[in-house]
Amino acid sequence: MRDHTKEGSLRFQAATYVIASAALFAAIAARWLLDGFLGNSSILVTVYGAVAVAVWAGGYRPAVLVAALGYLACHFLFLEPRGTFDWSTAKDTVGLMAYLFTCSLLIAIGEAMRLAQRRSRERGELLQASLAEQQKFVTLVENSTDFIGMCDLAGVPFYVNPAGLKMVGLESVEQARRTHVREFFLPGDQARIMDEFFPSVMEKGHGEIEVRFRNFRTGGTVWMAYKVLALTDAAGRKFGFATVSQDVSERRRLEDSLRTMASDLSEADRRKDEFLAMLAHELRNPLAPLLNAVHLLKWEGSNGANGLMAVEMMERQVKQLVRLVDDLLDVSRIKQDRLELRKGRTELATVIEQAVHACTPLAQSARHELLVCVPPQPVHLYADSARLIQVFANLLNNACKYTAASGRILLHAERQGSYAVVTVEDNGIGIPHDKLERIFDMFTQVDQSCERSRSGLGIGLTLAKRLVQMHGGSIEASSPGEGLGSKFVVRLPAMDAPELRRATASRSDVRTPTRRILVVDDNQDGADALAALLRLQGHETFVAHDGSGALAAAESHRPELVLLDIGLPLLDGYEVCRRIREHPWGRNMRLVALTGWSQEEDRCKSGDAGFDGHLVKPVSDTALASLLAPAAAEIPA
Ligand code: ADP
């Protein structure tokens, strides 16, 4: 870069010497032409012009050179005796002095003019540079997305940038000038800003606060990080305020939603803790009678009256445990949005009958009067009957639980247009008005202190609501108040015309043949109990507790049916199934998955592995019976 500049300057200097030489040459030529008129006088008259041109073009150096060469040339060419340098005459010396004086004057004036011109050029350049700098700042301020504004000490704005105008909904800087700074804030904040914030900025020189700005056009508000500094002149006197402020509405909104989320989370956490405590209580409840029943059976066997009572008690308690676990699984499915329905044509009265049947023992033990009123004409639904039984049984159970002994419970069902409407009403403890909406929330119980004794996890209504919604229906709760009973209304879309029911053979007519069955489960008790049950029904059974054992048993015993657990040690159930299928003897063997996983994708997975069916633990009597029926094409899958 520097070399370039140096080269340029050398070139410029050479050019000035060329110009000076040309001017000198022209001056000598002109004197030569004028020689006829001038003769021996004014021999240097044209050289002055050349000196002036040289000083103007290149400064004193070329000018001095031109003056010296010009004098020598003219002396030689035009001074008598011409063609010589004769320095002897006094007249010559005076002429030389006058020439030198005039040339010096010319060079001095020329240099002074050059200097003046250079200075003015430099000043111009400086001015241009500072204007360019200023323009950069103006562009920055005008294009900034922050609110940038200035006002005088009286609070009258004199500048607001375009982004600032937009944020507060003003049209122009003129409009901003007519709006006092106080007006930019909400009435509730004005005193704080004008009487506290600005005086503090005046004192400290700067200040920062988060405050809402008004939007004059929409009437809305914008949260701003309002940063203000005092403006001072060259003498240090304050003459106004400037602000560079950011719109922080989005951040404030996020903070607010985070706060709400945190409080929701801690509420959910609290409810979960309560739920866990209650769950432990609820799970322990059936264990005591179960253990007692086991002791009783040990002492007395199952034949006496006590034995029968113990078995019935065990069945009841196990059913209660199964219900709890099912509810828990449903809760987790709701959370993951994985609750599934198996819909088919369903008759409302049948569903209600089974729900009533399920809660009859509870109603009887509390001596409640249970009235059920269903329409004479069948009302058909396209629904998952098991899930609807669960919904109505839950409502009836609640009615029994939350009604003092000898209460009255009414279930009324009817068709209203294209809907089936089922109402469950009781004259129990009722629900306070402010709790009505919340009772459908997970783990919500109105009064936990006394609810504990009534048993429940606070998830039944959540499940009921979700299930009804999944059927395209709705559920509503109402209550005139505490102690005045409650009413739950379920609405479900009904089907138009009933189809004729296909006649089905009663299962009891069919004799179940004896089968060779291999039961595989790593839970030893589970496998042994199921095998014992199957043996009681007359089947021949084999038991294995891990994957390799299952393979070996299948190969050596060649059972007709294998009930195969999935989560097994050594080889899992899928792998065992695949390996059995690889053998010629295993291709037609009936393999049924026996597992706790019941989602559609679990069923697909077992189908892909080569299973003929998929049963969910604990296996119900009905599922087992249909599996072992002669035309066993109806394996639940
Ligand atoms: P829980 O297992 O506690 O019964 P639910 O989800 O079924 O759970 O019910 C939630 C809460 O709603 C209950 O704890 C109870 O406070 C209230 N509730 C439900 N049904 C009734 C009813 N028929 N009468 C009064 N309160 C009820």
Image: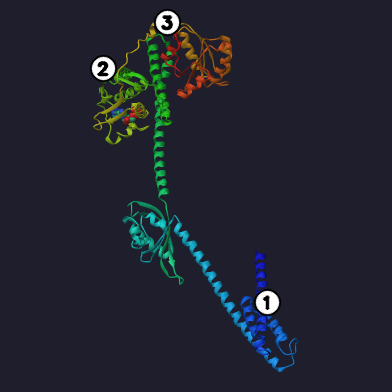
The disc, 3 or 2, on the residue closer to the chain's N-terminal end is 2
- Look at mark 2 in the image and give the residue it sits on: 377
Ligand 1 within 8 Å, label 1 CB: no
Kind of element beneath mark 1: helix
Question: Which numbered disc flags the more N-terminal residue, 2 or 1?
Answer: 1
Residue at x-position 56% and y-position 9%: 557
Is 399 situated left or right of 229 in this image? left
Quarter location, residue 272 = top left
Q: Which residue is mark 1?
A: 21
312 and 619: which is toward the camera: 619
Judged left or right of residue 570, residue 528 is left
Which of the two residues, 558 or 274, is positioned nearer the viewer here? 558
Image height of 48 relative to 504, above or below: below
Res 438 quadrant in image: top left
Q: Earlier in the sequence, mark 1 or mark 3?
A: 1
Q: Using a 10 Å C-alpha cutoff, classify the residue at mark 3 as few (fewer than 14 neighbours), some (14 to 19) or many (20 or more).
A: few
Three-letter amino acid code at the position of disc 3: Arg
Q: Residue 200: which numbered mark, if any?
A: none
What residue is at 69 percent from the left and 80 percent from the top? 65
Inter-mark Cα distance, 3 to 2: 35 Å
Disc 2 secondary structure class: loop
Residue 511 shows which numbered tag? 3
Q: Quadrant of the N terminus?
A: bottom right
Image position of 148 with respect to 635: above or below: below
**Distance from the alpha carbon under mark 1 to that under mark 3:** 136 Å
- Mark 2 residue type: Gln
Q: Residue furthest bottom?
A: 90
| Left/right of residue 353 with respect to residue 11 in the rendered view | left
